[in-house]
Amino acid sequence: MKQFVALVALVLISFLGFSQPDPVPYGSNKAVGKFLRINGVNLYYEIYGTGEPILLIHGNGTGIKGWSSQIAHFSKKYQVVAVDCRGRGQSELGTDSLTYIQQASDLAKLLTELKLENVTVIGKSDGAIIGLLMAIYYPGTMKQLVSYGANAEPDGLYPETANGIHSDRVKAEEMLAKGDSTKNWKLEQQKYRMMEFQPHITAEDLKKISIPVLVMSCDRDVIKEEHTFWIYRNIRFSSLSISPGEVHRFPTLNPDLFNSIVGNWISQPFKGEAVRFK
């Protein structure tokens, strides 16, 4: 019956001359895309919607496009700023080694240049690491943070994932040595070196965070569950969300649930008492 209704709807749409609107080309939207010179590189960003600002920070292997479902959802109520981090999407890599600290500085300065205040930062994977570092070193740039799938040390990753990152880094260096030009192996090397040997966020660093943080993960993540819990336990004003049955690509594969959890948390005053530190 549902298939019949869908077929009838398609026939009517075709007959009446209606067409589905083209999807927004997030990450390559010439209508809204802009560049800012930050720390010696051109960073590309897009802004959608109005309201209180949200900064979205993507994972290592993606860019603005990886946030498509979140931009479409949150831009209905908020001003959403999505950025391509160094070397990803349309942003320049620069000559420095790729580090989480450098990217935290990039994005803190981006918010300053855009004159955005009381920003909610939502980061996933490597973007969540960058978000934690922004909260530690640039606390005045944001009012709250959602950190999904972050690790504070390389050993927070499950061995299978860590071994895969090591293999990818070695391959990139081998291809660079060969002078292969089939891929941007310099960027690949930088990305995998960063994940293999960084970050180094201590418990004392986490204790410096003075804003509310939603520490998110899932029970099929590439991050060890006990490591996520350790991050949560060391942030004073933190909430914890572990979603059952989801994997690291949770925001992309099940955006409705992810957006619901995040949207509910960021729209409410922080409710947790810091009893763990009394």
Image (spheres, grey):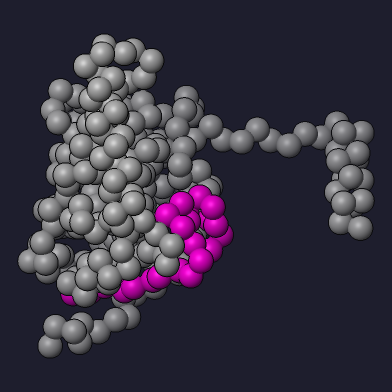
Q: Quick check: can you spot residue 236?
A: yes
As drawn, 98 above or below 108: above
Q: How many numbered discs?
A: 0
Give the percent coordinates (x, y) of residue 49: 47, 46
Q: Quick check: can you spot residue 121?
A: no
For the magenta stretch, what is the residue range?
236-257
Q: Name the foreground residue: 246 vs 19.
A: 246
Look at the image and say whether residue 248 sits in the magenta stretch: yes
Give the percent coordinates (x, y) of residue 236: 18, 74
As drawn, 170 above or below 119: above
Query: Relative to 129, is 262 on the left or the right?
Result: right
Give the image quarter of residue 148. Answer: bottom left
Give the percent coordinates (x, y) of residue 217: 38, 64
The residue sitting at 20% across, 40% down in the picture is 194
Q: Residue furthest left?
A: 204
Q: Name the foreground residue: 113 vs 266.
A: 266
Q: Name the foreground residue: 37 vs 193.
A: 193
Look at the image and say whether residue 238 sits in the magenta stretch: yes
Name the image quarter holding the C terminus: bottom left
Query: Relative to 127, is 218 on the left or the right?
Result: right
Name the image quarter holding the N terminus: bottom right
The residue sitting at 34% across, 51% down in the picture is 160
Query: Relative to 186, is 248 on the left or the right?
Result: right
The residue sitting at 17% across, 39% down in the picture is 99
